[in-house]
Image (spheres, rainbow, N blue to C red):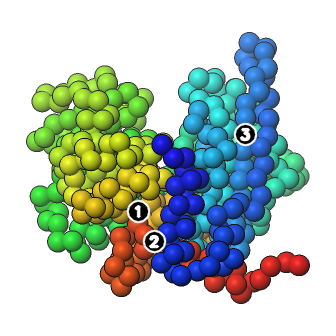
Amino acid sequence: MDGIYENFTTMVDRAAAILKLDRTQYEFAKFPEREMIVSVPVEMDDGTVTVFQGYRVQHSSLLGPYKGGVRFHPTVDHDSMRGLAGLMTLKCTLAGLPFGGAKGGVSVDPARLSHGELVRLTRRYTAMILPIIGPDVDIPAPDVGTDETIMGWIMDTYSMMAGKAIPGIVTGKPVELGGSRGRTEATGRGAVYVLREAMKRLRVPQDRCTAAVAGLGHVGRSAVRAMYETGIRLVALSDASGGILREEGLDVSAILEFKEKGGSLCDYQAPGVRHVSCCQVLETPCTVLALCTVQASVTEENAGDLQTQMVLECGNAQITSGAGDALEAREVTIIPDLVATAGGVIVDYFERVQNVQSLIWEQYEVDRMMKNIILKTFDQVWEAAVRLGVSLRMASYVIALEKVCDAKRIRGIFP
């Protein structure tokens, strides 16, 4: 299977061909501007020292500061960070946000660390990337394996080195430290706003819609909650431990409460609920399959087994380029990650504005503004897909790449 970075460059090349760009006009967009690989030594609770591998990749600063998450997960490597940083550039550009893309992380399983070890890992990683981050340079955010608490530790570490509080160094931090209300739910909720709009345009009856969701992390749980509130019937769910299935519909409230208490789906019991594999959840007959996993869960090998009308990419790079081609050949509608996952970074932008201007917005204001931006973005993608005769996935790349290339043309090359 191709890596995230190779899939990213493949899609960029295809978008450039549609735009009829020559190599010198767009090739810069395939390469990060700066890449840092760091060693992160951590003193463990038993007195030994373990050295973890860390990364921070800064893809583009054409339109503003670098922006992207910090991921703590065993799958973190150079290839994934390069690919995800590039996707962040296109995502921010597509939504009209004044950011460029970045991504960073540490190859570690945070669940295997004690609280103290996690604190020391976070602070040492922050110290190692300190020379290349800043509130006007590169602004980290939460991602897989990190949360608002970890963003608070990053903020504190950076602030201690600067000698004053600098809340703008990160977004996605606790509200008490200047974080924005609504940030935790933004990615999942934004994806469902886009899903509902797509269903209207495709004339999919909402009251007869069924959904399967792969992945129940922060984004997955938010998406499931938003779907349930919308009236969509959830029939299958999976997390890292396995999946559950009930064709008549799952008790979403009970499942989310069970997950919030730290439970795994392999241990969940309820009348009529069957335990299945993660692969079986992907293959469940449904109207919508929402992908919220850490890595690409739909590949060339299993794309033909999906039995869904629509695929909602709630996480970055959930579908390989070849798998996307196979699904589109079967007329499965893919709502691509570049627009579906934009809710999180849109609210990151709101958080930065609030920090810079010392503002505090209520959650309903944040949600209303996020919905407005993400639906306008989807509208642009839909219109471009119709005009160019391409998929929504391809249209999102075409629009974003054209904007990035226009910015490069206007700014030129230094010196």
In the image, residue 86 lies at what x, y percent? 61, 60
Q: Identify which residue, 414 or 56, lies in the foreground.
A: 414
**Kind of residue indicated by mark 3:** Gly
User: For this view, does 320 lie left or right of residue 46?
Assistant: left
Label 1 residue SS: loop
The residue wearing badge 2 is 396
Image quadrant assignment for residue 272: top left
Q: Which residue is tagged 3?
A: 54
Give the position of the C terminus as an image quadrant.
bottom right
Q: Mark 1 points at which residue?
A: 336
Q: How crowded is mark 1: few (under 14 residues within 10 Å), some or many (20 or more)?
A: many
Q: Which residue is drawn at 32% across and 34% down?
A: 278
Pick the front one: 219 or 397: 397
Spot occupied by residue 367 in the image (x, y as percentages of width and height): 43, 67
**Which residue is located at x 16 percent, y 57 percent?**
209
Query: What is the secondary structure assignment of the residue under circle 2?
Result: helix
The residue nearer to you, when weighing 203 against 45, is 203
Please state the total of marks drawn on the protein image. Answer: 3
Q: Kindly check if marks 1 and 2 are in contact, taking CB atoms under 8 A apart as contact.
A: yes
Label located before the other in sequence (1 or 2): 1
Position of residue 401 measured from the top left corner of the image (x, y, whole percent): 56, 74
Please say whether residue 98 is visible from this viewpoint: no
Q: What residue type is labelled 2?
A: Ser
